[in-house]
């Protein structure tokens, strides 16, 4: 009997010594066609636990660089507009629709490529890293080439996308494009003893979903099986609201499986 | 009344008709010496959207949770299964339950001193602080193991148990493998010189380890995490003392914000009971002792262990409005309970006697210090914090002092009167940051009048007084029973003290039910306020709802 205890003690324990965190370098992947991963986080300015989610996303961004694309979806109860200082509206129709469609009830929570785990694509921030690491080194199925043209006088953005199929597939795919904005300074609730008031007044909100450029779900790419080398071209135009700062805006475009909704490639480009 | 409501009524009447017909086949007769048993339960709700109370729109209109257990045993051999169906899960239950299937099935046999279980099983080591799998349907909790269990009893008074498997996660299993071993020795059975002793001693120990692959690119994570516990129990006559200490090695997880600190837990219970009086004392210290088979799991998912509560579980609706949920990341708790009877035919005891229970409990934070001047307490990817074992933290989580008097006034009239004063930290227990501490006084009267021909009327009056949260509530309930078959009840909870006049809402309910043998059916209509229900310190958020509820249960 004591032998079994000792066996479980030695065989069943991995005592970890510092450093506990890995070296956050080396996964940039710029300049080559690689699979990029989309992390959509559901958040809200009145969600005190959400800054921890933002921090997790930031750490992953540091690790993976351009290969990880983040979209912050402000939706649900914690994104509500109320009395100052929470009177700024971060929500968007596309964000509200995604929030409802995926049945988000807890915040912060996110989707990595909308890949389903245990029947739901929604996973907590601490699980994002593992799922990203499982996907990100797979060979890419598509390459998305974006070109943007912004007309400041009209606040009009023209988006052109060439989607190159890198592998043949019988599946049907869809193409979506979102407009996001970085650097929005606005209050955020936080659950941290360093902020006894529970609010950071000058919080920097990044990756904020502003608009679905071609709607919430985009449009279908193919009706017949895809062959390697197929190219699909799509063009859209969208007007920026007056309080959106064009220099801080980006287009996030992605291809997803129309049946499973799993994202297979994503690209991000800042407005020129 | 629309089609769906009519359909719900039709189902209710069909079941009522079915239940009143006696069964014609006794299942035990299927195989001589064999035995079949099981049970069935269905809960269906028809929802109306009600924006005033915050009841959401339910696109399906009707939601249903149902299950049935079927077991068969024959000469030491037992097989069983549970079919579950969620079409779709009732509001407040995790949507990942959606669907149908057989998530629980097992076969077991026992021979000589060995008992073997293949498939799903529930098990508990000691008080559960390193291992407990169980099902609590009201909470939507089911962390059953799927694997193997062996129980071996080499001699009288000694038992050894070994388990290995994965835990249930809705209709799947979690990613981690759980292995464990437990031994329990009853010294008085084993040591011949102690057989006649009045001092009863027993001790035991457990070791549990989980394996989960490290695929996290940000952290160096332990793939094998073990927890150990030792326990010692003593009793002599009216006195009983039990103790258990548990230790867990570094287990960074979503629950503890990925800190690498070891976990500790200590539980002490002592009781003294004589005729007409009893005293119970409990103390508990929990420090970073959440233990799950998926380090990313949250909510009630994939708990390997169970941290027993040291607070009283209130059963009345208003005294249960602010229940305590055990805080696995750290708490120190105490509870004392004194109960005694005032003898009959005395001025205080009255003609039929009176029983009194006085209970006090406290749950407090641990004292936590930075591991380094530059590292905040609880910082991810660090040791997290340091904590003195016996030092209380500054934050009170929960406090409850209550008294309950149970008195029979005559052969036909008995009553229970209760008062509770509860201090409730909403921020800690419900996860807010900007809510006030709630201080609530609750008064309850529960009176039962027995009427001729096994009929009875029971009524409750409850009042909750607080200046915080939704402020004052009043509740009244009237129930008429025709034992043992029928009951009818009407109740109303009224949030009359709410600052917002629009939210001074009546949560009324009408209900009726019928029981016969092992069968029971009930139907109710009314509004359910948003709240939290807890069983054994484990809690679930219940959203507001408005509609009909049908319950059917049967056992055989």
Image (cartoon, rainbow, N blue to C red):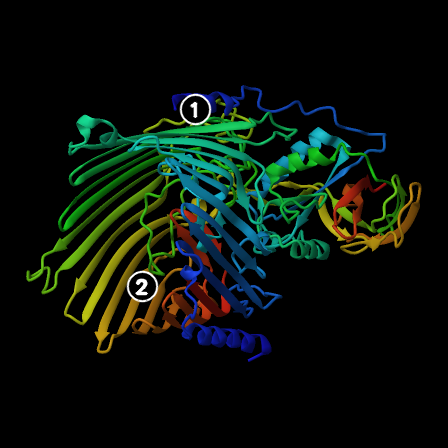
* Camera-side residue of B219 and A223: A223
Q: Chain of mark 2?
A: B
* Residue A56 quadrant: top right
Marks 1 and 2 share the same chain = no
Can I make out residue B231 in this image? no
* Camera-side residue of A240 and B306: B306
Image position, residue B316 (x, y; %):
33, 60
Image position, residue B209 (x, y; %):
49, 30
The CA span between labels 1 and 2 is: 55 Å
* Residue B416 quadrant: bottom left
The label on residue B387 is none
Image position, residue B486 (x, y; %):
35, 74
Badge 2 is on which residue?
A: B463
* Camera-side residue of A106 and B229: B229
Q: Residues within 10 Å of mark 1 (few under 14, many from 20)?
A: few
Can I make out residue A69 in this image? yes
Badge 1 is on which residue?
A: A4
In the displayed structure image, the side of residue B163 where residue B240 appears, left or right: left
Q: Residue at x 43, y 62 (%)?
A: B27
Image position, residue B422 (x, y; %):
32, 51
Residue at the front extreme, as displayed: B32
């Amino acid at each position: 009997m004591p032998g079994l205890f000792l066996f479980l003690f030695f065989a069943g324990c991995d005592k970890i010594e510092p450093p506990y965190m890995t070296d956050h370098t080396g996964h940039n992947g710029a300049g080559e066609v690689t699979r990029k991963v989309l992390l959509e986080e559901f958040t809200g300015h009145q969600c005190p636990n959400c800054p921890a989610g933002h921090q997790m996303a930031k750490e992953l961004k540091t690790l993976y660089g351009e290969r990880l694309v983040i979209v912050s979806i402000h939706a649900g109860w914690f994104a509500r507009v109320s009395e100052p200082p929470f009177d700024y509206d971060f929500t968007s129709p596309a964000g509200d629709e995604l929030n409802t469609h995926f049945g988000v009830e807890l915040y912060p929570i996110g989707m990595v490529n909308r890949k389903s785990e245990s029947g739901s694509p929604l996973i907590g921030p601490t699980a994002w890293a593992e799922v990203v690491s499982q996907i990100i080194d797979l060979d890419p199925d598509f390459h998305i080439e974006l070109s943007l043209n912004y007309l400041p006088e009209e606040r009009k953005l023209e988006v052109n996308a060439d989607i190159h199929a890198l592998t043949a597939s019988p599946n049907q795919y869809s193409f979506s494009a979102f407009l996001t904005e970085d650097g929005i300074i606005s209050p955020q609730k936080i659950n941290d003893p360093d902020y006894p008031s529970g609010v950071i007044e000058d919080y920097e909100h990044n990756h904020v979903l502003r608009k679905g450029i071609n709607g919430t779900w985009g449009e279908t790419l193919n009706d017949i099986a895809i062959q390697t080398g197929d190219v699909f071209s799509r063009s859209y135009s969208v007007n920026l609201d007056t309080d959106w700062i064009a220099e801080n805006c980006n287009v996030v475009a992605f291809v997803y499986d129309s049946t499973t909704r799993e994202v297979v490639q994503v690209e991000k480009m800042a407005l020129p | 009344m629309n089609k769906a409501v009519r359909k719900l009524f039709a189902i209710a009447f069909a079941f009522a008709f079915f239940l009143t017909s006696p069964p014609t086949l006794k299942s035990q007769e299927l195989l001589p010496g064999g035995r079949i048993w099981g049970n069935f339960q269905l809960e269906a709700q028809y929802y109306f959207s009600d924006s005033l109370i915050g009841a959401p729109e339910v696109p399906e209109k009707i939601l249903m949770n149902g299950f049935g257990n079927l077991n068969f045993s024959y000469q030491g051999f037992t097989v069983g299964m549970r079919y579950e169906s969620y079409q779709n899960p009732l509001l407040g239950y995790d949507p990942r339950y959606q669907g149908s299937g057989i998530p629980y099935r097992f076969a077991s046999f026992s021979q000589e001193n060995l008992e073997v279980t293949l498939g799903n099983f529930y098990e508990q080591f000691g008080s559960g602080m390193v291992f407990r799998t169980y099902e609590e349907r009201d909470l939507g909790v089911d962390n059953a193991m799927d694997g193997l269990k062996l129980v071996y009893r080499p001699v009288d008074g000694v038992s050894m148990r070994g388990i290995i498997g994965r835990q249930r996660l809705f209709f799947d299993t979690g990613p981690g493998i759980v292995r464990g071993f437990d031994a329990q020795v009853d010294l008085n059975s084993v040591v011949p010189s102690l057989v006649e002793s009045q001092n009863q001693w027993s001790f035991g120990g457990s070791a549990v380890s989980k394996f989960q692959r490290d695929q996290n690119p940000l952290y160096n994570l332990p793939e094998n995490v073990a927890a150990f516990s030792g326990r010692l129990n003593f009793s002599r006559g009216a006195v009983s003392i039990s103790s258990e200490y548990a230790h867990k090695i570094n287990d960074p997880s979503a629950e503890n914000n990925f800190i690498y600190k070891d976990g500790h837990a200590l539980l002490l219970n002592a009781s003294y009971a004589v005729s007409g009086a009893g005293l119970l004392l409990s103390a508990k210290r929990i420090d970073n002792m959440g233990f799950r088979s998926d380090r990313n799991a949250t909510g009630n998912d994939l708990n390997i262990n169970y941290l027993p509560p040291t607070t009283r579980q209130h059963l009345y609706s208003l005294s249960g409005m602010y229940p305590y949920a055990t805080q696995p990341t750290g708490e120190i708790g105490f509870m004392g309970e004194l109960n005694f009877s005032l003898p009959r035919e005395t001025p205080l005891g009255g003609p039929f006697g009176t029983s009194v229970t006085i209970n006090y409990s406290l749950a407090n934070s641990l004292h936590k210090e930075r591991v380094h001047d530059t590292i905040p307490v609880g910082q991810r990817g660090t040791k997290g914090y340091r904590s003195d074992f016996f030092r209380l933290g500054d934050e009170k989580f929960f406090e409850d002092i209550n008294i309950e008097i149970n008195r029979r006034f005559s052969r036909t009239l008995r009553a229970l009167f209760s008062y509770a004063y509860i201090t409730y930290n909403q921020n800690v227990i419900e996860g807010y940051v900007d809510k006030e501490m709630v201080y609530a006084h609750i008064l309850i009267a529960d009176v039962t009048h027995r009427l001729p021909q096994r009929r009875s009327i029971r009524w409750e009056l409850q009042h909750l007084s607080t200046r915080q949260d939704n402020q004052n509530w009043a509740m009244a309930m009237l129930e008429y029973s025709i034992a043992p078959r029928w009951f009818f009840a009407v109740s109303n909870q009224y949030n009359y003290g709410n600052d917002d006049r629009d939210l001074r809402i009546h949560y009324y309910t009408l209900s009726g039910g019928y029981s016969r043998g092992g069968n029971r059916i009930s139907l109710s209509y009314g509004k359910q306020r948003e709240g939290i229900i807890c069983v054994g310190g484990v809690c679930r958020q219940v959203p507001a709802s408005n509609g009909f509820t049908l319950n059917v249960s049967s056992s055989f």
